[in-house]
Image (cartoon, grey):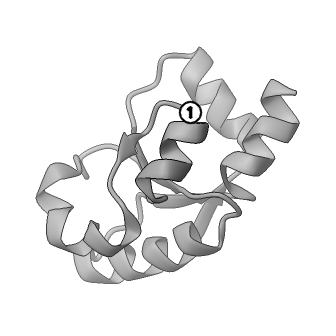
Amino acid sequence: MKQITPQELKAKIDNKEDFELIDVREIYEYEDYNINGKHIPLGEVMNNLDKIDTSKPVIFCCNSGKKSRAITIAVTKKLNSDNIYSLVGGVTNYYTEIEA
């Protein structure tokens, strides 16, 4: 499973790189704080793979990184892709490392 650090994600954002950021948290978590990812709750990801552009890097995020690691593994296996990442420490870590 591949991972990306908050600093690496911030560099991609700053460099305007083309990638898909998918936030798998529940709607109330997403509304509380998000980093502008496409919102697809964890339980709906596997049924909505057609809504994810896998022709470019896909980065999954959640609060702590646990759920995004799990879905990264599942989607990587399902799509047989090596272009799927999990945000280390989730949006909580991103906020602490980048925004705070």
Instruction: Assign the N terminus to one quadrant of the image.
Output: bottom right
Question: Up-down: is 7 above or below 72?
Answer: above
Give the amino acid at mark 1.
Answer: Ile
Count of numbered labels shown in the rendering: 1
Note whether residue 1 is visible: no
Farthest-out residue, front? 28
Q: Position of residue 12 (x, y in %)?
A: 57, 28
**Residue drawn at (38%, 81%), measured in percent from left and top?**
74
Residue 96 is left or right of residue 19, and the answer is right
Residue 48 is left or right of residue 97, and the answer is left
Q: Residues within 10 Å of mark 1 (few under 14, many from 20)?
A: some
Note whether residue 57 is visible: yes
Q: Secondary structure at mark 1?
A: loop
Residue 97 is left or right of residue 33, and the answer is right
Q: Which residue is mark 1?
A: 35
Instruction: Assign the C terminus to one quadrant of the image.
Output: top right
Q: Quadrant of residue 97?
A: top right
Q: Nearer the viewer, residue 15 or 75?
A: 75
**Residue drawn at (74%, 41%), measured in percent from left and top?**
94
Question: Up-down: is 97 above or below 85?
Answer: above
Q: Nearer the viewer, residue 65 or 9?
A: 65
**Residue drawn at (63%, 37%), measured in percent from left and top?**
9
Q: Position of residue 79 (x, y in %)?
A: 24, 74
Q: Nearer the viewer, residue 89 or 8?
A: 89
Question: Up-down: is 83 above or below 77?
Answer: above
Q: Quadrant of residue 64?
A: bottom right
Q: Position of residue 68 (x, y in %)?
A: 54, 67
Q: Position of residue 32 (x, y in %)?
A: 59, 39
**Residue drawn at (47%, 30%), measured in percent from left and top?**
36
